[in-house]
Amino acid sequence: MQKITIIGTGNIAWHLARGIAACPKFEVVQLIGRSQEPPADFKEIDTYTNQDQVEQLLQTDIIIIAVADAAIASIAKKLENTRALVVHTSGSMPMSLLDQLPHYGVLYPLQTFTKGRPLDLRTIPFCVEASDSKNLEQVQKLASALSQNVQQMDSKKRANVHFSAVLANNFSNHLLALTAGYCDAHELSFKLLEPLLQETVSKAFNIGPTRAQTGPARRGDQETIAKQLAAIDDDQLKQTYILLTNSILRTYGKEEL
């Protein structure tokens, strides 16, 4: 059984810890985090170490750095004496952040994670990379134990995938947040939109988002657009509406606002 140390106590760390606990050939033996006391939501891991003592590692085969992007380099610097395979979980940061280590790679799960909301890791794509073929084999074994969808990917392509995820997930979720705020302000149920949104996503993947586009901007319906624009009393929402409406109008060869 391969032993694993997880550095980080955030969303990705929580999901990976749960996923690895279900893998018979891997075991998380140590958790390292910023708090002085062990986090209550990582009870399945027996040994907890404060990040200030990150050098005090138990004997381990793989170290997973699951921290904010800005902290990866500083954590890696403290691991220079380890012989374990060290991987980070970032989509946007290059593998070269770890190149001062003898064995290193990347284990990037392509999903949005929230603590306390369990996911089936087997359905989530894992993008992997490593410094050499032997390390890649080790990363792939761990990824394959967690997921049925493992793809080898270099840092540049992984950054492109991460950017596409920002467009598809972060931006769309922000639009949903604006929509929820609008619904609240006008005493509407946000839940009312759930069937519409489910069909929107399903249709985009079934027939393609360009073909699936509907609405006043797709039709070039300037009258409806003008009415909706005049009714918006929130500046942020108005600017977002104009920006996206013009983008749709431009995409389909219609006159912009």
Image: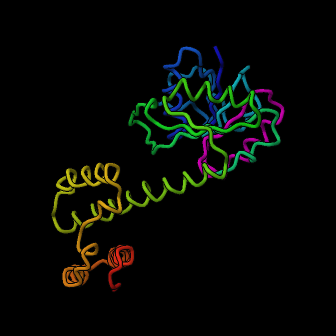
Q: How is the image coloured?
A: rainbow
Q: Is residue 34 visible?
A: no
The answer to whether residue 203 is magenta is no
Q: Is residue 65 above or below residue 187?
A: above
Left or right, 15 with reference to 143: left
Residue 131 picture quarter: top right
Rendered location of residue 29, percent (x, y): 62, 21
The residue lying toward the viewer, choosing from 164 and 188, is 164
Q: Residue at x 69, y 31 (%)?
A: 136
Q: Is residue 171 above or below residue 115?
A: below
Rendered location of residue 253, percent (x, y): 35, 79
The answer to whether residue 88 is magenta is yes
Rendered location of residue 186, percent (x, y): 17, 68
Q: Is residue 17 above or below residue 243?
A: above
Rendered location of residue 44, percent (x, y): 51, 21
Left or right, 19 with reference to 202: right
Q: Is residue 204 above or below residue 66?
A: below
Residue range in magenta is: 67-92
Left or right, 59 with reference to 153: right
The residue lying toward the viewer, choosing from 225 and 250, is 250
Tag count in the figure?
Answer: 0
The residue lying toward the viewer, choosing from 8 and 94, is 94
Q: Residue at x 59, y 19 (%)?
A: 27
Q: Quadrant of the N terminus?
A: top right
Q: Quadrant of the C terminus?
A: bottom left
Q: Is residue 54 visible?
A: yes
Q: Residue at x 78, y 32 (%)?
A: 103
